[in-house]
Each structure stands twice: as C-alpha cells, then as structure tokens.
Amino acid sequence: MRLILLGPPNAGKGTQAQSLINTYQIPQISTGDIFRANIKQETPLGKKAKNYLDQGLLVPDELVVDIVTDRLQKDDCQNGFLLDGFPRTVVQAEALEQFLKEHQQNLDQVLNIQVRTEVLVERAVGRRVCQQCGATFHIKFKPPTKDNVCDVCGGQVIQRKDDQRETAEKRIKVYEQETSPLIDYYEKRDLLVTIDGEQSIDKVTADILNALKDA
Ligand code: AP5
Ligand code: MG
C-alpha cells in the first residue's frame, strides 16, 4: 500500500499513522520527524532546517525532496509506505510523481484529514510529544497515564516548540497557502479521499480503514 496522509498541522496525521503502519506493515515516513531528529543530533541538515521549523515555515523544497526519495529507495519501502507531511507543495508532489514513475510505482490513495482551524489550534496548544520515541499525546484528548511520562517508552513528554499558539497559527496559514492546493492536485488524479478528522481518534481510524478497503 502506498499512501499519503494530507492535512493541516495538528489534523491527526501522526496519530492515525500509528494504526496504519501496524495494519499494513509499512513504514511511516514523517518529514517533520526526520527534521526534528536531525535538529536534535545537530547534523548539517538539522542546522539548515532548524530556523524554518522554529518559525513555522516550510523547509525549502530542494532540501526535502532528496531526503524523501532516498528514503523511498530503502528495502523496507518495497511493500509500500505511508508519507506523513510530504508532499507539502506542488513542486514536492511533482517530484514524487516523477520518482514513482521512474520506479514503476503508483500511489494507492491520498487521505485528506479535514479539521477546522479553531479545532486545530486547540489540538496544537494541548499536544505533548515524547522526547525519546515521538509518541503523541494531548493534555485533554489523550493524556499520558502519568503526568509528563510517555506511556510507550517512559521518556519525558514535552511540548513542541512550534505548538505555541502563534507558531501553530502561522503553520496553518502556511498550510492554506502552500499545501492546500494539493487537495485539487490529487482530486484531479482521482486519488483523494476526504476524512472527517473531527471525530474521535478511533472513529477517524475506522473511516480511514474503511476507505482503504477499495483502494
Ligand atoms: P510536521 O511535524 O509534519 O508537522 P505538521 O504537518 O504541522 O503536523 P503535526 O505533526 O503538527 O500534526 P499531525 O497532523 O501529525 O497531528 P497529531 O497526530 O500530532 O512538520 C513540522 C515542520 O517541519 C513544518 O512546519 C516544516 O517546517 C517542516 N516540514 C515537514 N515536512 C515538510 C515538507 N514536506 N516540506 C517542507 N517543510 C516540511 O495530532 C495533533 C494533536 O491532536 C495531538 O495532541 C493528538 O493527540 C490530538 N488528536 C489527534 N487526533 C485527534 C482526534 N481525532 N480527536 C482529538 N484529538 C486528536
Ligand atoms: Mg505529525
């Protein structure tokens, strides 16, 4: 299964990715996670990307495309993949299309998780993530069993820097300007399925799995 999770910041892409990678046994490729890991390790890529992430801006296309196309050539992507947070611009979508064509592969589905802006901001300010394994929580909707301790690995649970209200709002604006044209892009290619992302986490998962039955 070759899938893309599309949707604004805090729509629930990472949350839903967890169920999908287990169901289909495919790797999750989250460009945001890749950048955060590089920033933490202070790699050359991390140093280039840091300012963009901190400000809620997109990392330039040329830095993103090569990382993803390299990743897609790894053995674990042979049976498929789940792209989370990529593509985010039409230039990235075209580069992916070209890559897949060259490798005689097709996308199966693009899942567009739809959530209104006011709900996105509430999700952003309440989100907490594990510093160690990246597991995602929410102080109201999905609190960790023990305050600030990850249920999965016992690591420390913190707030992402770009989840402060102002930066979260900025990321939504960037999404509207640069990423939302992809809805039309994939609709035209007959690949888009829109999912109501304002339901409970489990109901969103159920709707996604149902939509993928025919993919
Ligand atoms: P990235 O890490 O991809 O951030 P994002 O797209 O802004 O998405 P988020 O991770 O914020 O949200 P999500 O949809 O995964 O939601 P989640 O499941 O956590 O990118 C970060 C940055 O990296 C970008 O700003 C950019 O700088 C750079 N970047 C990354 N990719 C790039 C690219 N391709 N090109 C250029 N730059 C790139 O859920 C959110 C919260 O809501 C959680 O607390 C969760 O528990 C809760 N929640 C989830 N679902 C529900 C539900 N149904 N009901 C109630 N609460 C819910
Ligand atoms: Mg995410």
Image: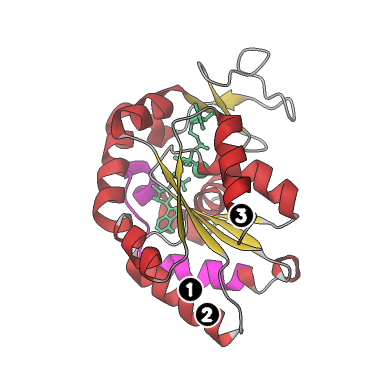
Q: Is residue 45 at all visible to an observer of this figure?
A: yes
Amino acid type, callout 2? Phe
Q: Are marks 1 and 3 in contact (CB under 8 Å)?
A: no
| Figure quadrant of residue 71 | bottom right
Tag of residue 96: 1
Q: Secondary structure at mark 1?
A: helix
Q: Are marks 2 and 3 in contact (CB under 8 Å)?
A: no
Q: Among all residues in the image, which is located at the extreme bottom?
A: 102
**If the image is split into quadrants, where does the C terminus sit?**
bottom right
Which span of residues is magenta-colored?
51-71
CA gap between label 1 and label 2 equals 5 Å
Q: In front: mark 2 or mark 3?
A: 3
Position of 20 relative to 165 (above/below): below
- Disc 3 target residue: 212
User: Which colouring convention does the figure follow?
Assistant: secondary structure
Position of 26 relative to 95 (above/below): above
Amino acid type, callout 3? Leu
Tag of residue 127: none
Tell me what residue is drawn at x 37 percent, y 58 percent.
59
Q: Position of residue 172 (x, y in %)?
A: 30, 42
Q: Nearer the viewer, residue 204 or 13?
A: 204
Tag of residue 99: 2
Q: Is residue 130 at all visible to an observer of this figure?
A: no
**If the image is split into quadrants, where does the N terminus sit?**
bottom right
Give left or right: position of 200 versus 6: right
Amino acid type, callout 1? Leu
Does label 1 or label 3 sit earlier along the sequence?
Answer: 1
Q: In front: mark 1 or mark 3?
A: 3
Q: Position of residue 37 (x, y in %)?
A: 58, 48
Give the overall secondary structure of the magenta segment.
helix
Q: Is mark 3 within 8 Å of ligand 1?
A: no
| Figure quadrant of residue 158 | top right
